[in-house]
C-alpha cells in the first residue's frame, strides 16, 4: 500500500482545531481522490467541536472515515466531493462521506459518482439530503398530508422540500428566525413563526434541536398524528411536554437517525442506493440557497469556530486549492 500525506482538519479539544498532516493509504481496491469541496454540517459538527457527544454514543455516532475519538483529537465530517486521480475512474467526480481533507483514499464503492446534472459545488449537500430522505420515510408522509417542519436548518428545509413535492401536500416551515421565510419559499413551502403556525397537522417533523421547538412540534400535532424527532441533542437533555393533550390525542413520537434505513425499506434499500438517490435529488438549482457561505480550506482552521457559532449558517462550503478557475 502506497502511503501519501494530506492536510486535514482535526478537532483537538473542545473549541480547538488545527490543520495537521495526515497519512493515508491508496491500496488495492481503493481510489485516490483530490478534494474539490467539502461541506460543514453545522448541527452535528458543532456538537463534536464543543465536546457534546455523549460518551455512551462514541461508537454509534462515528462517521464512516473518522479518525481519532470524540474524546479528542478527532477528524470528523462526512461531506466531501472530489476528482478521482488515476486508475480506470480517473477524472470522475465523486462524493464520499469523508472529513475535511485535501486528498484521501477510500474503497471503490465508497466513492459514489456525482450525476451529471448535479454540479460538484452543490453535491456537498448529499449527506444532508440523505438524512432528509430518511426522515421523510420515517414520517410516512403521504399525498395530501398537512405537514409542518419545526426548525428551518439545512435538514429541516430539505425535509420540507421533499414533502412539498408530493401531490396535494400542504407544507409549512416553522422557525424563530422570520428571515427564513425566503428560504421556505425557495423550498416550495409556506412559513410561520412558532406562535402563528397552524395546528391539527398530520405529520410534524422536529429539527430545531431545542426544547421549545419540540414543545411547538407536539402542540401542532393533530389527533393520532406522528411527530418525527430528527434533532440530535447530544449531551443536552430537552424538556418534553408530555402532559396536557399529549395522551388524549394519542400522539406518536418517532426517532429518526440516518445510521439505519427504516425497517419498511430495509429489504430493498441499502446505504448505497439511498445515497445515490440523495445525489439524484440535488439536481434542482433551488437547493443552492442552502449554501450559506464558502471558505478556502487554508483558512478553515481560523474560521471554523465562527462558522459553527453563527446561527445563520446553513451548509458552509469549503473550497480546496484543486478547484480550477
Image (cartoon, rainbow, N blue to C red):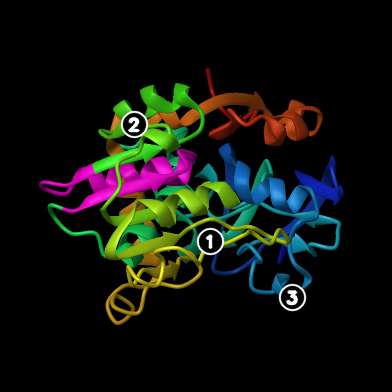
In space, the residues marked 2 and 1 are separated at their CA atoms by: 24 Å
Q: Which residues are magenta?
A: 145-170
- Is 57 placed above or below 186 here? below
Give left or right: position of 19 versus 89.
right
- First in sequence: mark 2 vs mark 3: 3
The N terminus - image quarter? bottom right
Closer to viewer: mark 2 or mark 1: 1
Residue 222 within the segment the image draws in magenta: no
Mark closer to the chain start, 1 or 3:
3
Q: CA distance from mark 2 to mark 3?
A: 37 Å
Name the residue that disc number 3 marks.
56
Q: How many marks?
A: 3
User: Residue at the spot x=60%, y=64% of the render?
Assistant: 64
Point 73% across, 57% down: residue: 24
In this view, the mark in front (2 or 3): 2
Above or below residue 20? Residue 201 is below
Q: Note whether 158 is above or below 269 in the view shown.
A: above
The circle on residue 190 is: none
The local crowd at label 3, few if under 14, some if 14 to 19, many if 20 or more residues have their Cα within 10 Å, is few
Residue 191's label in the rendered image is: 2
Q: Which residue is mark 1?
A: 241
Please state which of residues 181 and 275 is positioned toward the viewer in this rendering: 181
Task: Answer with left or right where residue 7 lies relative to residue 260.
Answer: right
Rendered location of residue 218, percent (x, y): 42, 57
In-image side of 49 versus 317 (left or right): right
Mark 1 secondary-structure assignment: loop
Of residues 33 and 43, which is closer to you in this image? 43
Task: Residue 283: name its quadrant.
Answer: top left
Rendered residue at 53%/49% (across/down): 86
Amino acid at each position: 500500500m502506497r502511503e501519501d500525506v494530506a492536510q486535514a482538519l482535526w478537532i483537538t479539544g473542545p473549541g480547538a482545531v488545527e490543520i495537521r498532516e495526515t497519512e493515508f493509504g491508496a491500496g488495492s481496491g481503493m481510489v485516490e481522490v483530490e478534494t474539490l469541496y467539502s461541506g460543514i454540517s453545522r448541527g452535528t459538527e458543532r456538537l463534536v467541536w464543543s465536546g457534546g457527544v455523549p460518551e455512551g454514543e462514541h461508537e454509534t455516532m462515528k462517521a464512516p472515515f473518522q479518525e481519532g475519538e470524540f474524546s479528542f483529537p478527532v477528524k470528523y465530517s462526512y461531506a466531501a466531493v472530489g476528482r478521482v486521480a488515476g486508475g480506470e475512474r480517473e477524472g470522475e467526480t465523486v462524493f464520499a462521506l469523508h472529513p475535511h481533507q485535501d486528498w484521501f483514499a477510500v474503497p471503490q464503492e465508497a466513492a459514489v459518482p456525482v450525476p451529471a446534472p448535479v454540479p460538484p459545488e452543490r453535491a456537498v449537500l448529499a449527506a444532508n439530503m440523505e438524512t432528509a430522505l430518511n426522515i421523510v420515510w420515517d414520517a410516512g408522509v403521504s399525498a395530501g398530508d398537512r405537514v409542518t417542519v419545526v426548525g428551518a436548518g439545512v435538514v429541516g428545509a430539505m425535509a420540507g422540500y421533499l414533502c412539498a413535492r408530493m401531490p396535494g401536500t400542504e407544507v409549512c416551515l416553522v422557525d424563530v428566525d422570520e428571515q427564513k421565510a425566503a428560504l421556505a419559499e425557495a423550498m416550495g413551502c409556506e412559513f410561520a413563526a412558532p406562535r402563528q403556525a397552524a395546528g391539527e397537522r398530520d405529520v410534524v417533523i422536529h429539527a430545531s434541536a431545542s426544547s421549545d421547538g419540540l414543545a411547538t412540534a407536539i402542540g401542532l400535532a393533530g389527533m393520532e398524528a406522528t411527530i418525527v424527532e430528527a434533532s440530535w441533542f447530544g449531551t443536552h437533555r430537552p424538556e418534553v411536554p408530555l402532559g396536557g393533550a399529549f395522551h388524549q390525542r394519542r400522539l406518536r413520537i418517532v426517532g429518526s437517525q440516518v445510521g439505519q434505513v427504516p425497517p419498511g425499506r430495509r429489504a430493498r434499500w441499502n446505504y448505497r442506493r439511498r445515497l445515490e438517490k440523495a445525489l439524484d435529488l440535488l439536481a434542482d438549482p433551488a437547493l443552492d440557497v442552502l449554501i450559506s457561505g464558502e471558505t478556502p480550506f487554508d483558512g478553515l482552521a481560523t474560521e471554523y469556530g465562527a462558522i459553527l457559532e453563527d446561527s445563520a449558517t446553513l451548509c458552509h462550503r469549503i473550497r480546496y486549492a484543486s478547484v480550477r478557475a
